[in-house]
Image (cartoon, rainbow, N blue to C red):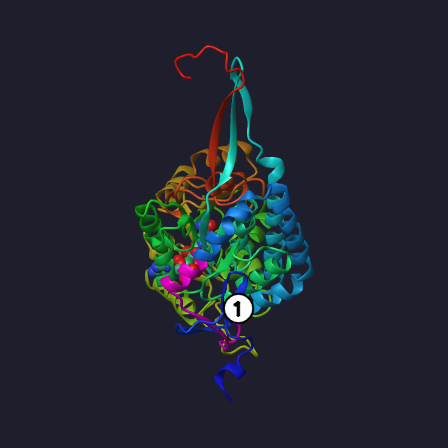
Amino acid sequence: MAVAEALRFPEVRNYIKGKFVDSNEAKIDVISPLDGSVISKVPISGYDTLDKAVQSAKAAFPAWSAMPIKERVQILFNYLNLLHKYREELTELIHLENGKIRSEAVAEVDKAIELTEFAVSLPQIIPGEILEVSKGVDCKTERIALGVVASITPFNFPCMVPNWTIPNIIALGNCMILKPSEHVPLTANRLAEILTEAGLPPGVFNVVNGTRDVVEAICDHPDIRAVSFVGSTKVAKIVYRRATGNLKRCLALGGAKNHLLVLPDAQVEMTASNIAASMSGCAGQRCMAASAMVGIGNVDHIIAKVCEEARKIVPGDNLGSVISREAKERIERYITEAEKAGAKILIDGRNPTVKGAEGGFYVGPTVIDFVKPDMAIAQEEVFGPVLAIMRTNTLDEAIAIENNSPYGNAAAVFTQSGGLAKYVTEKASAGMIGVNIGVPVPREPFSFGGWNESRFGAGDITGKSSIEFWTQMKKTTIKWNPEARTNWMS
Ligand code: NAD
């Protein structure tokens, strides 16, 4: 039997000018991390294919940007309805190509729906301002689309992260290229079909697949005006430097190491269940995951409860797989190194057995106590269902550990004291802070984005802040009374 016939899904094709197009570029396997099987193949495209997509977006831009925003969002209303209609199908695709459990996959689709709800509300949010600035002279501001823009996305949210950008970019009148992660191209392609079914004109939305070459081509292409990137800090730095070096606007979100500061007075059940859910949700592959807990004083009773909660998390049941064999090996290496460096493993998730999914890439929930701040597991992003617990005597020592991290996506505090909670929210060096919440994700209309090495560029990627990123402001000054005297500025 030919290889193509054995694949669960047809080979992925790039989506350019409203059509899926064949490519003679090299292809790599798309592997389901649930069982290690090859489910499709994805082209590794380069500059020439990207250029075709850019030309299609460029050709679509004049008509699309000239359409009033209230008309453009009618298509997004259709898209919103279709996301509801295909909710189950998208859930299954995400589950298969990413490995997260179905309840997490469906939450991603629901989040894409919420993001689109924000985008359809943009006509109510973006009206400019007008003011009579001197007698008979008005100044007016408007938000104008940039042109062709690109969005580069990671593997961990195949539906949500592309939808951080797609609805806002196109509602605001831009045309775009999506470069999804090569690990999860199937959901992105399905989104292209859904946008077409919603009535989006050809060329407004294009998908070009690939890895490093196409990302570099995006940073270099002279007709791309702005680039958003979501992924690891290592690549975020490369993309930010290269795109801005080519005089593009760039917003590059990177990795994270999120600290949960736990005080002895914290409410035990709530704190433990929040911590266990935060460290293990999406198998720890969330940029908002709690990967480091800092216990202040005696929090043994809370750690015991965290372990009780973590023991209820079962790989293959309520815990999905990690994305690849390499990811599994990396995560397990961090655990082994921490053990060798003297940390105490309370729950060991290395090499779990998952009946019926022996080829899957699973790591069980892992809780490690007495981690020292200078250990790799305390400093680096592990991106697996692993909680590293550090202990301090004082709150200020705990805050110093959080502040010393090069990252700054999220931080949270668990306490029943309002004063201490406020102190931590003021001192923590992170863009998203939680009080008694393990995953402090701001929801629309608030904006998502970290600080420090978790985000390069100004502003945030979602919500109101993203409007600034995807548009430029035009200021028009109109003199209605030509007989009026000129003054020094007119
Ligand atoms: P990644 O950096 O490996 O890949 C992200 C994108 O960059 C992919 O599309 C990939 O094809 C491309 N890419 C990979 N290597 C490249 C290179 N050398 N040059 C140019 N492009 C390259 O990230 P990932 O493994 O897909 O995703 C996980 C990472 O994303 C984690 O670090 C996680 O914290 C981060 N993340 C951050 C946020 C946030 O909001 N800050 C959100 C989600 C994920």
Q: Residue at x 47, y 56 (%)?
A: 177
Q: Quadrant of the C terminus?
A: top left
What is the span of residues highlighted in magenta in the rendered image? Answer: 34-54
Q: Residue at x 53, y 72 (%)?
A: 34
Q: Residue at x 61, y 67 (%)?
A: 92
Q: Is residue 292 visible?
A: no
Front in this rendered view, residue 117 or 340? 117
Image position, residue 309 (x, y; %) = 57, 58
Image position, residue 463 (x, y; %) = 54, 42
Residue 223 sits above or below residue 194 on the image: above
Amino acid tagged 1: Glu
Q: Residue at x 53, y 79 (%)?
A: 7
Magenta stretch encompasses residue 50: yes
| Residue hosting label 1 | 97
Image position, residue 62 (x, y; %) = 51, 47
Front in this rendered view, residue 314 or 125? 125
Image position, residue 181 (x, y; %) = 45, 62
Q: Is residue 445 visible?
A: yes
Q: How many marks?
A: 1
